[in-house]
Amino acid sequence: MKHTVFAVASALAALSFTPAQAEQSIVIGHSLSPTSHYGVGADAFIAKLEELSGGEFTGTQAPAGQLGGERDMIEGLQIGSMDVVITSTGPLGNFVPEVFALDLPFLFRGYDHARKVLDGDIGQELLAKVGENQLVGLAWTENGFRHVTNSKRAVKTPADLDGLKLRTMENKVHMEAFSGMGASPTPMAFPELFTALQQGVVDGQENPVTVITSSKFWEVQNHVSLTGHVYSPAIVLASPILMDGLTDEQKGWFDEAAKASAAATRAEVNRLEEAGVALLRENGMEVITDVDKAPFAKLAEPAYAVYTDKYGTELVTRIQNVE
Ligand code: PAF
């Protein structure tokens, strides 16, 4: 009898602990392979979250656009069907217009400049703006400087872009930039891109070395020109529906996990900026490295008005002035 009472009491005690200790599994969606720079970032997020929470939270990747394109995944965060997403800013300006400022061509002078802007006051202010739009911006991370690839010809000057059907992200700043530079921009979600290149629906695309390598675009593209025409930031986003249900301590774990994710992704971007070009050549691509960027930048200038006509020049000037 004594034993039975003890057993029942223990079972009740165990039950009363169950909700607090129940393991919650988080899914992190992104568009690239599990071993890409986003995949590395997703793994770092999961490892840090599991470590800080003592296993209360676990995580898995949903890579390669399994859960949709970047726009779809952002919408999923807003309605709570997604937990965490690593995405470029490509479609984000359609939800948080101020973010379009980061997508302006030839705005950032290099990785140091871009990372300083995103890690400083401007980055924090933009994360706060993201938070006003049914999303939680956990941390800025990175995709890299974008370059043009195509299956038709080596692009050395803007004249070589003339009439090229070029897939762009669903981003009106990028589209205006490419119209200015003479290409025919065709917006398309990333999951459709490989097949579109294979079937000749578009002649080319533009993405950082990180993406060109992890997506094996050498299977469908012959030429890459290191135009570095725009820096492509990325962001770790969470669903407000998930985050609103967390304690402050748990929210802190997510913040730290996102920081660890960004650091791991940037390290992988650095590595591929060094090793990636050789990989492209090994896989048969012609790589044009001596691109004179000035004429491309001049022709891309009309893209600035897409942002400044509506939101003014203040943020752009502040970004330019960060040393
Ligand atoms: O080209 C894009 O859509 C993006 O750069 C990508 C590859 C999905 C990474 O964010």
Image (cartoon, rainbow, N blue to C red):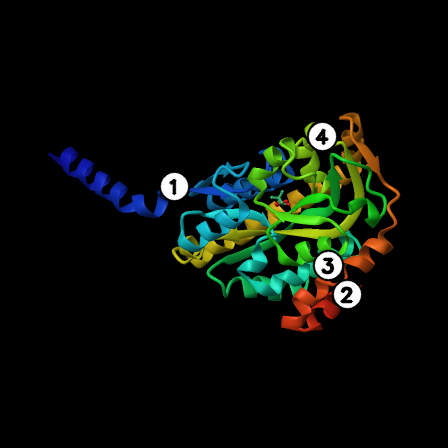
- The percent coordinates of residue 111 (x first, y second) are 76, 51
Q: Earlier in the sequence, mark 3 or mark 1?
A: 1
- For disc 2, the marked residue is 320
Queried on whether the Cβ of the residue with tag 4 lies below 8 angstroms from ligand 1, the answer reads no
At label 1, which amino acid type do we have?
Glu
> What residue would you read off at disc 4?
218
Looking at the rendered structure, the kind of residue marked 3 is: Lys
Q: Residue at x 80, y 47 (%)?
A: 227
Q: Secondary structure at mark 2?
A: helix
- Outermost residue, front direction? 163
Mark 3 Cα-neighbour bin, 10 Å: few <14, some 14–19, many ≥20: some
Q: Earlier in the sequence, mark 4 or mark 2?
A: 4
Secondary structure beneath label 4: helix
Q: Which mark is residue 23?
A: 1
Closer to the chain start, of discs 2 and 1, is 1
Q: Earlier in the sequence, mark 3 or mark 2?
A: 3
- In which image quadrant can residue 268 be found? top right
3D distance between C-alphas at marks 4 and 2 = 34 Å
Residue at the spot of label 3:
116
Task: For ligand 1, give the image quadrant.
Answer: top right
Q: Earlier in the sequence, mark 1 or mark 4?
A: 1
Residue located farthest toward the left when viewing the structure as drawn: 1
Q: Nearer the viewer, mark 3 or mark 4?
A: 4
Q: Which residue is more in the foreground, 42 or 143?
A: 143
Answer yes or no: is residue 207 visible.
no
Q: CB of mark 4 within 8 Å of CB of mark 2?
A: no
Category of crowding for the residue at label 4, using alpha-carbon neighbours closer than 10 angstroms: few (below 14), some (14–19), many (at least 20): many
Q: Is residue 178 left or right of residue 226?
A: left
- Give the CA separation, mark 3 to mark 1: 37 Å
Of tags 1 and 4, the one toward the viewer is 4
